[in-house]
Image (spheres, grey):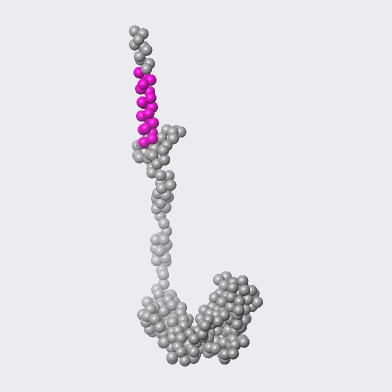
């Protein structure tokens, strides 16, 4: 990977309001880390950084960093992470990692497919990208901007695994060698699409059953089959069954009527 020059400036402001003001002035806040240095707050010119990213294949940039008002010579730094605004895509923050030309570093490198797979061209298959980036380790100047993989020989059901990738000289591919990176899958037929749609659809009966259960939970327990409904306007105790309330009221009415009939018969017997 070829290094590109970039100038940075020391940054004294670190609070949120100050960082917003900094972005409004066309600067991007940054932090540089390193094994032998303390983290240092920096600010970068947004237009300069955007210009570098525009001409680069990926965001993996190797920088010849010059820090203004710093007595040190140029510092070799690797762009570790760039934060973008989720809607506008504007650069928000950059993390830099100072590296040494003689020490290997580990980075994520994008994978690009080259050619048209035979299974796609002749059999209507679909080329699937399982991994878009892979982890590699190399000296900073040997790092590739991306790794290209030839897929023209792939038939349906075939793929390229991590162990099949031929890395450039001086570059080591890390990870499980059996992990799939690219694969050619068979095309999905209309019958398979219809079957998948049918499985995803929910039957109306199941929806009604769920709704009924929900109503039962809200209203409480349902009255037993055959039980008389509660009398109109009769007060009900909380949690009592309607059938039981109706039976209790009927018993109370019978008990009240019985003594009244006996009281009417006694005066008639005295007259005799």
Kindly indicate the quadrant of the structure image that contains residue 150. bottom left
Any part of residue 60 in sight: no
Question: Is residue 4 left or right of 232 when viewed as pictured?
Answer: right
Query: Majority secondary structure of the magenta segment?
Result: helix
Any part of residue 244 in sight: yes
In the image, residue 70 lies at what x, y percent? Answer: 59, 88
Total number of numbered labels?
0
Identified at 55% across, 88% down, the residue is 75
As displayed, is residue 195 above or below residue 9? Answer: above
In the image, residue 22 lies at what x, y percent? Answer: 63, 76
Identified at 60% across, 80% down, the residue is 11
Please say whether residue 255 is one of the residues in the magenta stretch. yes
In the image, residue 2 lies at what x, y percent? Answer: 53, 89
Front in this rendered view, residue 9 or 38: 38
In the image, residue 120 lies at what x, y percent? Answer: 43, 77
Quarter of the image containing the C terminus? top left
Please say whether residue 248 is one of the residues in the magenta stretch. yes
Question: Is residue 94 left or right of 221 when viewed as pictured?
Answer: right
Identified at 59% across, 75% down, the residue is 14
Identified at 49% across, 86% down, the residue is 36
| Part of the protein shown in magenta | 244-262
């Amino acid at each position: 990977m070829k290094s590109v020059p970039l100038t940075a400036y020391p940054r004294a402001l670190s609070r949120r309001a100050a960082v917003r003001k900094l972005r409004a002035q066309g600067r991007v806040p940054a932090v540089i880390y390193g094994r032998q240095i303390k983290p240092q707050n920096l600010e970068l010119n947004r237009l300069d950084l955007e210009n570098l990213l525009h001409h680069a294949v990926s965001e993996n940039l190797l920088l010849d960093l010059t820090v203004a008002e710093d007595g040190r010579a140029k510092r070799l730094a690797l762009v570790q992470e760039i934060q973008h605004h989720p809607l506008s895509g504007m650069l928000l923050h950059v993390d830099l990692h100072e590296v040494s030309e003689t020490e290997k570093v580990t980075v994520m490198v994008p994978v690009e497919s080259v050619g048209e797979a035979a299974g796609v061209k002749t059999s209507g298959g679909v080329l699937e990208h399982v991994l878009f980036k892979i982890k590699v380790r190399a000296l900073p100047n040997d790092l590739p901007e991306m790794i290209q993989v030839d897929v023209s020989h792939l038939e349906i059901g075939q793929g390229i695994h991590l162990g099949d990738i031929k890395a450039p000289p001086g570059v080591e591919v890390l990870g499980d060698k059996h992990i799939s990176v690219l694969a050619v899958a068979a095309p999905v037929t209309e019958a398979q699409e219809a079957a998948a749609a049918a499985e995803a659809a929910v039957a109306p009966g199941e929806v009604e059953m769920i709704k009924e259960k929900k109503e039962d939970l809200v209203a409480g327990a349902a009255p037993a089959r055959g039980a008389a409904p509660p009398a109109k306007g009769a007060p009900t105790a909380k949690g009592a069954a309607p059938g039981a309330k109706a039976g209790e009221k009927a018993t109370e009415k019978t008990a009240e009527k019985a003594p009244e009939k006996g009281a009417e018969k006694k005066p008639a017997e005295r007259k005799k």
